[in-house]
């Protein structure tokens, strides 16, 4: 099978463009959209890198990415499994059935492609690690000041995960420039409108 490009790559400096993730979002923006933290091409490269370390199931990859980001980002099965299917169809990985799970192993073609994109992988992993570290530091800072965050009772875990990610992103954004803060305010207004449409009572 011929080699295929992944697409979705950002420019220099990390995912999404020069100097940060998501262009204008800069260092904080896409934390507000945690479910889209990685472009599809970035996620596929990271998955291929982790498969090179050792054969992995989909769940193993989810946990490994969560660990790389210090708990900040955990891709959903609906994101990780299409990425694995792509790797298999592109000839970069093979899948073997182990009980009710598939274990994915890198191919020589996949290793060659990964070698051609080591810099891109390193950039994405560096972004994930630094973003996770900032979030971790913010949580520790809040706890040290007696402001330990409390989850909303009686809701799905995803709601509290998203709420915590939003809180961490806001804490970073308010230290940014006036333009960044204006963008933050606009994002929060849009989010409030969308939540209001669903009549969600938080």
Image (cartoon, rainbow, N blue to C red):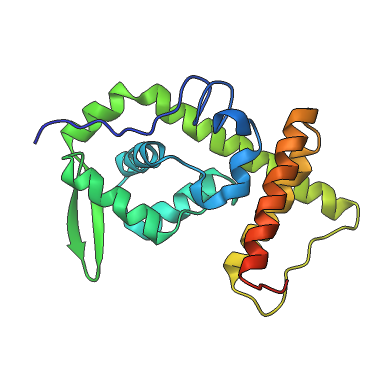
> Residue at point 24% right, 71% down?
100
* Among the 4 quarters of the image, the one containing residue 44: top left
Q: Residue 180's x, y, as percent?
A: 73, 32
In the depicted structure, whether residue 109 falls above or below residue 116 = below
> Residue at point 80% right, 38% down?
174
> Residue at point 46% right, 55% down?
63
Q: Is residue 99 left or right of residue 160?
A: left
In the depicted structure, whether residue 39 falls above or below residue 94 = above
The C terminus sits in image quarter: bottom right
Q: Residue furthest bottom?
A: 154
Camera-side residue: 165 or 119? 165
Q: Residue 76's x, y, as percent?
A: 44, 58
The N terminus sits in image quarter: top left
Q: Residue 88's x, y, as percent?
A: 19, 47
In the depicted structure, whether residue 190 falls above or below residue 200 = above
Q: Is residue 115 left or right of residue 40?
A: left
């Amino acid at each position: 099978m011929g080699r295929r490009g992944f697409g979705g790559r950002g420019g220099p400096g990390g995912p999404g463009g020069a100097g940060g993730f998501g262009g204008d979002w800069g260092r904080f923006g896409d934390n507000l959209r945690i479910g889209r933290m990685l472009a599809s091409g970035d996620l596929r490269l990271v998955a291929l890198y982790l498969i090179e370390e050792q054969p992995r199931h989909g769940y193993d990859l989810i946990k490994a990415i969560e660990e790389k980001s210090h708990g900040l980002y955990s891709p959903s099965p609906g994101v990780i499994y299409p990425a694995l299917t792509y790797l298999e169809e592109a000839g970069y990985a093979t899948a073997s059935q182990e009980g009710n799970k598939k274990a994915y192993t890198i191919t020589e073609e996949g290793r060659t492609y990964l070698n051609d994109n080591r810099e891109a992988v390193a950039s994405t992993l560096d972004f994930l690690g630094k973003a996770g570290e900032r979030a971790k530091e913010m949580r520790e800072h809040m706890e040290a000041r007696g402001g330990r965050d409390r989850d909303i009772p009686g809701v799905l875990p995803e709601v509290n995960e998203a709420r915590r990610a939003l809180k961490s992103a806001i804490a970073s954004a308010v230290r940014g420039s006036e333009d960044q803060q204006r963008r933050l305010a606009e994002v929060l207004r849009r989010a409030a409108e969308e939540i209001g449409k669903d009549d969600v009572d938080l």
